[in-house]
Image: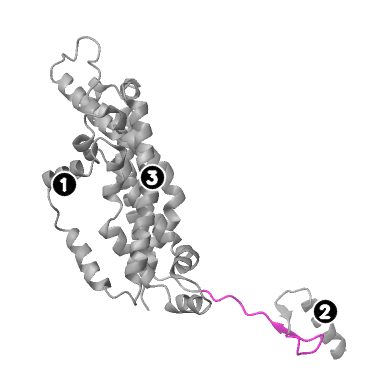
Amino acid sequence: MADLKKKTELGQGSTGKGLKKAPSGMGRNDYMPVPKPTKYKVSTADRIFTVCNIIFMALFVVITVYPILNTLALSFNDGVDAVRGGIHIIPRKFSTANYASVFAMKNLTTGLFISVARTVVGTVLGLAANAILAFIVSRKRFLLKKQLTAFWVVTMYVNGGMIPVLLLYKTLHLTSTFWVYVIPGLISAFNMLVMRTFMEGIPDSLEEAAQMDGASYSTIFLKIITPLCKPMYATIALFIAVGQWNSWFDTMLYNRLTAQYTTLQYELMKLLSSVSSQSSKTDPNSGEGANLQPISVRSAATIVTMAPIVCLYPFLQRYFVAGLTIGGVKE
């Protein structure tokens, strides 16, 4: 009877309740008990930390999202009503006149095309130039790496001034051209140093193995370094693209009199200046254009300018985080 009871218990255990199959080295009908999951006791301090963490993150989200929602609400609110204040995240008097004034700009199409073109061309060429330069400076066999690095660091804090730079660009025939947006910003000392630091963290054994197989430096850069630097490339590309897209001061300095090379941001700045000057001379209770106020037009212009970057950021966010963190880890 004892043997029959033992076999019955083993047969019931084969269903998986409380038992699991033994390793292959044991007998066919041998089973071993499954360990119960360990239960960890949550202390009061852990609960307090969790609650505080949730509250902090909720406040952080509110602080981050509220300015965007407030700007969006102001952009869809009537201008005269917006001057009264008290608008938070919902328009009080809905109106699309602000966006109508933005999209009715004379050079909107030209400015949008030039802004997109300078962003795309400037980002691609700037990323390539900084990557090649960073690769050269990051090589241990390069003799002048310390001297050149010190030279580029100095340029981050010292410049020639606005007038000498303008005269230099005129001498180089860059003014009143599209390339004044691209060529002067090809090399950025900050971006180059970030890329150099990232590349220095790549093991030297990869380069040495490639050289033993007969690979040249161009092959090493294109087929070994570049695939490993994709997160960092995405981060720097986002930096360059945001800078190119938001720039308007260079248009005012170098292409103010050349309408074919105007940018969207410069046209929005002119629109805002025009609305500001008109609002100071117009009676709010009279005539056409009285409902356009600087605060509402500025909000609409901000949304129009911000929308492309906001749509682009989610696709680069995972690379952006990785690119900023991986390069800071040293063994």
- Along the line of sight, which residue is nearer the eye, 59 or 324? 324
> x%, y% of residue 116?
38, 38
* Badge 2 density bin: few <14, some 14–19, many ≥20, Cα 10 Å: few
Residue type of the residue flagged with mark 3: Val
> x%, y% of residue 86?
24, 30
C-alpha distance separating marks 3 and 2: 72 Å
| Residue matched to label 2 | 11
| Rendered residue at 37%/50% (across/down) | 125
| Rendered residue at 16%/46% (across/down) | 165
Q: Nearer the viewer, mark 3 or mark 2?
A: 3
| Residue matched to label 1 | 165
Q: Quadrant of the C terminus?
A: bottom left
- Along the line of sight, which residue is nearer the eye, 149 or 102? 149
| Residue 89, visible in the rendered structure | no
| Residue 29, visible in the rendered structure | yes
Q: Nearer the viewer, mark 2 or mark 1?
A: 1
Question: Is 253 displayed left or right of 187 in the figure?
Answer: left
The residues colored magenta run 23-39
Indicate yes or no whether the magenta region holds residue 100: no
| Rendered residue at 33%/66% (across/down) | 196
- Along the line of sight, which residue is nearer the eye, 291 or 161? 161
Which label was assigned to residue 121?
Answer: 3
> x%, y% of residue 142?
32, 74
Residue type of the residue flagged with mark 2: Gly
11 to 321, vertically: above or below: below
Secondary structure beneath dot 1 equals: helix
> x%, y% of residue 249?
21, 39
